[in-house]
Amino acid sequence: MAIRIEEVIETLKKSLRHRDRVEHIEILSSQNPIYGKLRKDFPANIRNYLSRKAIKLYEHQCEATENLRAGKNIIITTPTASGKTLAFNLPVFERLHQDKEATALYLYPSKALSQDQLKVIKELETIGTIKTDSAIYDGDTPSYKRQRIRDSSRIIISNPYELHQILPWHYRWQKFLRNLNFIVIDEAHRYRGIFGSSVAFLIRRLQRICKFYGSSPQFVLSTATLANPLEFSEKLTGLDFELISSDGSPKGKKYFIFYNPYFDGIGTLSTHRESMDLFLFFIKKNLQTLCFALSRKMAESIASQSKKKLKESERYLASKIAAYRAGYLPEERREIENRLKKGTLRGITSTNALELGIDVGSLDAVIISGYPGTIISTWQQAGRAGRGIGESVAVLVAFQNPLDQYFMKHPQVFFDKSHEEAVIDLSNPYIVSGHLMCAASELPIQLEEDGIYWEENVEDILKALERENLLQQTPHGWVYSGKGRAVDAVSLDNISSETFKVIKQGKLLETMDRAQAYREAYKGAVLLHQGETYLVNDFDLKNLIIQIERKNVDYYTQVMDIADIEVLEEIKRKKINEFTVSSGDVEVTEKYIKYKIMKYDRVLSTENLNLPPLSFKTMGMWLTIPENIRKKIEARRLDFAGGLHGLEHALIAIMPFHVMCDRWDIGGVSVPSYPPADGSKVFLYDGFEGGIGLTEKAFQLTDNIFKMTYELVRDCQCEEGCPACIYSPKCGSGNRPLDKEATKMILRELI
Amino acid sequence: MLEDKAENKTVFSRIGKRWRKSIDRVKEYEIREDEQTIDREFIPSFLFSLEYQKAQELKGRLLEKYKGVLLEEAIQGERLRTEEGSCFHIENQEKININIINPEKAKEKILSNLKLIYGIGGATEYFLKKEGYRTIEDLRQHPRFGLEGTRFLKTINDNRSEVINWIGRWFPKSHPLMLCASGLWKKEDFIILDIETMGFFGRPIILLGVAQVSANYISTHQYFLQNIKEEVAALRGFLSHINKNNVFLTFNGRTFDIPYIEERLAYYRMKGELGNAHFDMLHFSRRAWKKELPNCRLTTLEKYLFGIERKDDVPSALVPEFYETYLRSKNIGPLIPIIEHNQQDLITLANIFSRLHKEWQ
């Protein structure tokens, strides 16, 4: 079984088929384990657990334990598979063993992750003989079990959405909350940007209630590597933290390959085909391989085509390949995870469902088909290869888009670049006001005491809410008096809970959200599931049910959509030089009007679709570019549309610094208009239904934003644009067209 | 972060309006066009469109009628003053005829049910009775069931509330034997309870209604909030009626009224024990009349059992809306049916209790 990765790499480097495509190999050296020592050993039952599992503690695990013992809050940023979970589980169990009343709350961003964590905790509970009655408490928990869990479980695993719903019921949780010693927040890096800011206030609401019941729990944050872990943790919780970042776990040597199908600028095979090719190459070399694709469809199609290929040559391998992605039912996912751990699966393709800490054991190789958009994600995905001390390989396969190509040509930029910052904004009045309402419905707000949980302006916001009869100032504090439940009106993120059910002969096959259903499961679409093709027979919009049937087809379908943006109301407007800058309400619409039936890359036919448009109203800011500037740019034979597009990207890159959000929280559209109409425009909008004040605030800060954007583009050393200036990691049109010079010209006129 | 103070103010007020809109959109009831599938009787979560229209018309009429009238002028009551503020207290007394099983009879009936003893099912009971063990008292001499029998006798003599839990272990909550257990208490011990609220949980209670029966009278006490600030005083008023010997008599109070009050007490950081014995008429009514009636809402039972047809009533689902209209307009019109509705509920509840005892004698 033992395969020398080095040999595989050598083959890659030598083979005619591959060698040119290998643009770069970064070697990440191996590391011997650094073990640690505890000042005082764990109690016998935990020691017993450790010896039964043959675990020796690493330095960072000891450090985490000592800090938690000392009553401190910790943030652990060591990489995937470094034993983070154990690092906090052991001290938590130690406390729960010493104090038979003590409780702990674990928050996970998804239900699937909760399941995994429960398994780990149950094992510790059994082998370590520490009774905690650990349980999951989330939307799936049947009501007859709920009271028992609240009253007797000492470890409860939940998620932020459930916590948001629970808090108004705190009196039923008295016993648990009174004894709450720890709040563990795993995958904490997910709580950044607007979503993170909401979660930060959710946590403050919980802290306020804990204080009422006389507890002040310690926090454990576990996250991917971030640029600003301490600042992030302090903002998320309002407390001081100790950083645990030095990884003591052993590492095998890892080869990180940048693989470029477009090394010659043209490319013979698509990224998707090249990824499949590498996938098969590794599998045949006996490497257990995981391939990440950017979309569900891609993940499915790589799996099914690989299977097909293998059936022709190595038949026995074909059954050892599976796809794994969100939307699969839990049982199906469990089975795939188990097969992967047991080694009966050799290759697996996935969307980022596996990027999260689901424990699938060690893998030899990871293929990342297309840059996932953030450095954080790229490292998370690459971290899936090489658990333990064996050698491993990770490959980033580039798309033809400028951003991917930039990294291929400048690998050092990637390897030197620090990870993204996780931004949290505690002053966004849209978020603050929503959580103030929720808090007021949990316990009356008394500013003398509760002031610590909020920043400036709170009183003004409370008064504004009082004018709308949502709150009332009473001798007992600010009391919530709205007609509906506050937590029902305030959502933590923008994700709708609507799910479409995909039904095959009366049986549920999988679930998907509305946007996905529109893109992939419209009537007539070919749907892939576990590599099998299904035909969509019926798309029931009213009941959210999609009926499919199994059918072998040799074509696939692709929806064609048109994105559109419309100004609903211009609320403010100002002149900057010859430009007009406006802010107001906009509506972003996606229309799905047709789909193509495709075989290979050929369009067989185009069919009409009858789906209502998907649209959402939000706040936007837009810039109208005067005609004469367009003419000036065109006179210099520059691409005006590329200039606008570049401006849109650069503005989105700079905005987060001024309005405190993640760049993924902002959307943009540029609309070059050739006369007459009302001028060419660049739109920026809040990526949240109804808007969350991002562009509204940006409108007040345009001077700074435009100036900084200009400096960014002007001072960037690149020639035609790069990720540091006008390339966007989430561009819908693959960063095309772009014209840096034109962007610079527009910006110069703007300041 | 927003620099300009005046600018902030306008942003804040715009945000306030936005929340107002989205809070208004949170739906807690829906209006239905037709009368099919109605089994969610006790949750006022849906309304028929005719009912809705009628209620809106009523609101309009009341706003007209009570323009400029003060609450004290329209409804006889007085300010209840406490250390933590005041509220409006309305007291009434009416004649009523309540007949429930007396404690001796109740005890006799319960003790004759041997199935309450662990290990005794229908067949065993039959044979035991044949052997002469007619009551649990007789069982004390029995070699196998003696110990448990003695324990039950001690419970029924010393701790009536525990008898309810005991019965609950072997019989459903709606079982006639359970109702029979309510006879272990005196009429005067019952606290008949019904609250009106601004919604399902997490919002203020606007009216707490309590009634107690003595001899041939029922006296009702209603603690009403003229504004949200008065909730603590109203809760205090309510708590003044409760001591540990009381028993609650409610309609769906197990799932709604009692947890709701407990939640509000916790909200205001107030202490109050509401763990008293509790008889919920909804469970019994369903068992007794579900098959004969379109639904088991209190007003339906009232109509069927006592021939009372409420005029100018406000549907429970619309209570929050009526109260909001009052808060905004300061016109007391919409309050009148809420207060009357609540009082009528209390009286009907007492009557249903009595009727159930008669029905299941």
Image (cartoon, coloured by chain):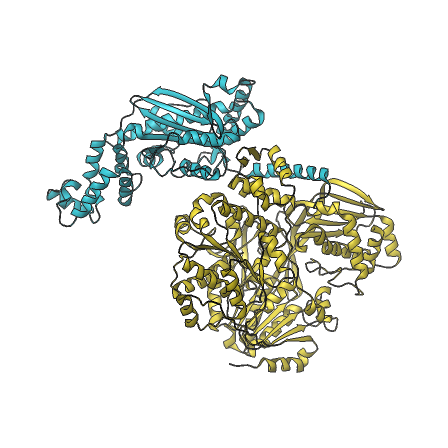
Depicted B307 relative to depicted A138: above or below: above
| Image chain in cyan | B
Where residue A133 appears, as percent x and y from the top left, is 40, 57
- Asked if one can make out residue A332 in the rendered structure from this viewpoint, the answer is no
The quadrant holding residue A310 is bottom right
Closest to the observer, B75 or A508: B75
User: In the image, A676: left or right of B172?
Assistant: right
Where residue A600 appears, as percent x and y from the top left, is 64, 67
Give the residue drawn at x 73%, y 61%. A727
Closest to the observer, A423 or A529: A423
Tell which residue pokes out farthest to the left in this image: B131
Give the residue drawn at x 52%, y 31%. B228
Where residue A136 appears, as percent x and y from the top left, is 45, 55
Closest to the observer, A241 or B336: A241
Depicted B199 relative to depicted A262: above or below: above
Depicted A472 relative to depicted A372: above or below: above
Closest to the observer, B211 or A103: A103
| Image chain in yellow | A
The quadrant holding residue B256 is top left
Q: How many marks?
A: 0
Give the residue drawn at x 77%, y 50%. A704
Where residue B249 appears, as percent x and y from the top left, is 34, 32
- Asked if one can make out residue A390 in the rendered structure from this viewpoint, the answer is yes
